[in-house]
Each structure stands twice: as C-alpha cells, then as structure tokens.
Image (cartoon, rainbow, N blue to C red):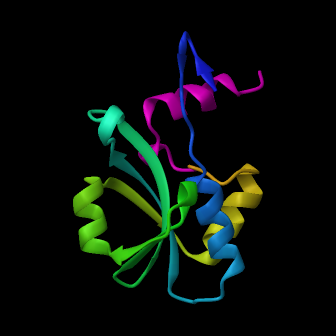
C-alpha cells in the first residue's frame, strides 16, 4: 500500500484474529482491537492491532507469529491503549455489517486508518 511517496506496510492481524474467533468455540474468547506502540523502525508511531484474549491469556498469530502470553505482559510490552473487545457473536455481527475484519470502532483507529475509511466513502 502506498500513501504519498511512502510505502505503508500492513499486517494481517485483523484477518487472522477475526478468523480465529469464528473458527473456535470457546465461550469466553474475545476479539480485541486496540492501539499499540510501534517498535523498531515504527517506534513513536501508534499502530492499530488485533489479537485474541481468553481470560488473562493473549493469543496473537498475526504475521506468522505464535504469541501466547499473559495479558498483563502483552499490554506492557505493546504499551496497549484504547482497547475494544468483542464476543464471538458481536464480532460476527460486526464482520457482516462492515464487510471487513476491522477496526470497526473509531476509538481504536489510527490516523491512517481513519483517512482510509473516510476516503472509501461513497458520496
């Protein structure tokens, strides 16, 4: 994806987490959308991200990773803010309504996600 003259890398976290919650029947499982602090070359930037929570355990299989860790540690490392959580039923409803894997709530959008959403509007 190109924005101006800069290439913007996109991961697959929303898709992977969305499929994960739909494909698994764990009643207490939650799909989470939130804002994480960029690391490495993305340090200082806010990044929209998606993952799965079951109780106090986080599952993040995005971008080829297999992260399973305690929620407290995950939030600490990612400096996670503005989290929106969805049950399986809520997530399925939002996927059908929006025809995508998210983010669906403006409170967990980054600036470039907001720009993309606004530019995609049909007038």
Q: Position of residue 10 (x, y in %)?
A: 57, 39
| Left or right, 92 with reference to 52 | right
Q: Position of residue 70 (x, y in %)?
A: 31, 77
Depth check: 56 or 61 in front?
A: 61
Return the residue found at the far top. 5
Residue 71 lies, with reference to residue 80, above or below; the image says below
x 28%, y 63%: residue: 75
- Identify the magenta region: 104-123
x 54%, y 65%: residue: 61
Residue 2 lies, with reference to residue 50, above or below; the image says above
| Left or right, 93 with reference to 30 | right
For residue 95, which quarter of the picture? Answer: bottom right
| Left or right, 22 with reference to 66 | right
x 28%, y 35%: residue: 43
53 falls in the magenta region: no
> In the picture, which quadrant includes the N terminus?
top right
Number of marks: 0
Q: Position of residue 103 (x, y in %)?
A: 56, 49
x 56%, y 11%: residue: 4
| Left or right, 78 with reference to 116 | left
Secondary structure predominantly adopted by residues drawn in magenta: helix
> In the picture, which quadrant includes the C terminus?
top right
116 falls in the magenta region: yes
């Amino acid at each position: 994806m190109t924005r101006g003259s800069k290439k913007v890398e996109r991961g697959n976290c929303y898709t992977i987490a969305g499929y994960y919650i739909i494909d698994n029947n764990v009643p207490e499982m939650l799909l989470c959308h939130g804002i994480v602090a960029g690391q490495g070359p993305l340090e200082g930037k806010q990044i929209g991200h998606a993952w799965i929570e079951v109780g106090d355990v986080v599952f993040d299989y995005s971008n080829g990773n297999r992260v399973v860790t305690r929620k407290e540690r995950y939030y600490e490392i990612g400096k996670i803010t503005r989290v929106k959580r969805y049950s399986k039923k809520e997530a399925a409803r939002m996927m059908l309504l929006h025809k995508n894997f998210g983010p669906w709530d403006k409170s967990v959008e980054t600036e470039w996600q907001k720009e993309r959403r606004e530019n995609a509007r049909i007038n």
